[in-house]
Amino acid sequence: MRIKLVLGFWLLGITLAWWAVAPSGAGLAPAAGAVGGGAAWWAARQQMIYLSGLWSVGLMVLAMLLALRLPWMDRALGGMDKVYRLHKWTGIAAALTAVLHWGAKESGGILKALWGRGSKPARDAVLPWLTDARDFAKDLGEWAFYLLLAMIALTLLSRLLNYKHWRLLHRAMPVLFLALVFHSVALMPLAYWSQPLGQLMGALMAVGSGAALWSLAGRVGRARTHAARIQSIELLGEERTLAPIEVVCALPSSWPGHRAGQFAFVRFDQAEGAHPFTIASAPDALGSSLQGEPLVRLVIKPLGDYTRTLHQRLRVGQPVDIEGPYGRFDGQGSAHRTQVWVAAGVGVTPFLALLEARQKESAASAPAHMHYCTRDAASDPLLPRLRTLCAQAQPAVPLTVHSAAQGQLLRPQDLQGLAGPLDIWYCGPQGLGDTLHAHASTQRSWRLHRESFAMR
Ligand SMILES: Cc1cc2nc3c(=O)[nH]c(=O)nc-3n(C[C@H](O)[C@H](O)[C@H](O)COP(=O)(O)OP(=O)(O)OC[C@H]3O[C@@H](n4cnc5c(N)ncnc54)[C@H](O)[C@@H]3O)c2cc1C
């Protein structure tokens, strides 16, 4: 909902600014013959080229800003995973409006075939010092457009490219953005620059270019990155390649502290990007190291190419960069609703922290019910700890375990027996989250809060 609202407002702002300078009625009700010789269609095409171009570059600016991972965005959008989702949908919307821009430009061929070029409007003047760069700006825009489409296709068709390579390619996006800014500045009509539209777009493109350069310089999140150290490592299970590992990290005094349910970007290896992992311990729950450094716990499941190799790579004492904390998955909904926590697989990590935070009596904690979906309850290494934390929580948290090996899959209807309107907190795989979401949208008294574990 917030994604639609933000995108809606952003596009509305740009559209209103364009509306204020668009020639009155030009191209808005094209009627061949009314103006004669298809002139209205040519005018409509020209305005559509401008408007769709403004939309596209405006959306790219928004995507660039969202990529900065600023803490106030985390607050405004209800979590950094939501900021990422908005960033992704903004990128997709930018590509769709770019298709519209390209389509409007290509429609010139059809208009020429129908009415000839006679009634085509004259080219608008552009910034004088860029007049000679017009052709270059057009070619650059066209190539950047093709690359943008390819990037969006690789993002959506995740099987085509693994995350690691996709991420490397994605780092080129600021360069593509700067190319599109040049295209826009060189081809935007001169008359726009003296109007609020030109000032708005000029400011947006300047801010977006700053964000792109910041990103290219590798500065994103650096101010929130803390040089930590691995304090201990434990394999939680017998099978080295399948068992999760528990890593306790000692943080420097610059660490601002975290709230239960938050996550951080963790870089164990300079050659590897930072990976997001939930801080699976409550604030102060692990105390501090002998050197007085606060300790936090990560529980990492070997789910992909890199995490499968972690048990071999990590060493006690190894330096590790931790950026954060981020996120607003706090399991505290409205006091008038029943709180239901649903975890699946490694999605249990934020709940481990939330439960650990409830081990001491606290008047602020509303009662909660927990559902945990696991492949096999008999061999799940995290289940004994979860049972203890639920039993000892204040107040105790009733736990229902759904073990797939025993055919006990969770169905959204299973939650229907709980009294009152529900606040459902879900963390786990996309598929079950989507099923819960589909069911929640048919239940007026359900509110679903999701922590997304995917950032592509
Ligand atoms: C907010 C959040 C909290 C998470 N908490 C935990 C946790 O507590 N324990 C746990 O085991 N896992 C957690 N994950 C998932 C974990 O980040 C991925 O399993 C891990 O990064 C996979 O890396 P890989 O290279 O081994 O896998 P790959 O096979 O390369 O990637 C699998 C998927 O992991 C995600 N991913 C991979 N690398 C990155 C990256 N650098 N940045 C962002 N996403 C990436 C992508 O969605 C990708 O499609 C969390 C994810 C998010 C978004």
Image (cartoon, rainbow, N blue to C red):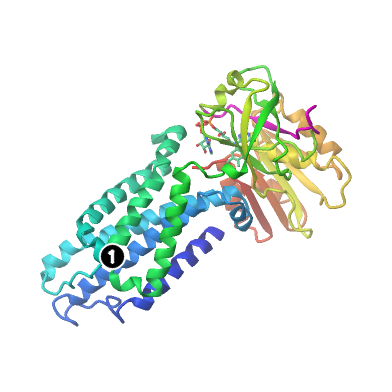
Q: Is residue 175 above or below residue 6?
A: above
Residue ID at (37%, 46%): 175
106 and 50: which is toward the camera: 50
Image coords of residue 309 (percent x, y): 55, 22
Residue ID at (20%, 59%): 132
Residue 171 in magenta stretch: no
In the rendered image, the residue lying farthest to the front is 129
Image coords of residue 25 (percent x, y): 30, 81
Image coords of residue 298 (percent x, y): 68, 32
Mark 1, residue position: 49
Mark 1 lies within 8 Å of ligand 1 (Cβ measured)? no
Q: Which quadrant of the figure has residue 264?
A: top right
Q: Which residues are magenta?
A: 287-304
The answer to whether any part of residue 98 appears in the image is yes
Relative placement, left or right, of 388 versus 35 is: right
59 and 399: which is toward the camera: 59
Secondary structure category for the residue under label 1: helix
Q: Is residue 224 above or below residue 128?
A: above
Relative placement, left or right, of 59 versus 138 is: right
Q: Please, what is the three-letter code of the amino acid marked with disc 1?
A: Ile
Residue ID at (78%, 47%): 368
Image coords of residue 316 (percent x, y): 68, 21
The answer to whether any part of residue 236 appears in the image is no
Q: How many marks?
A: 1
Q: Is residue 260 above or below residue 447?
A: above
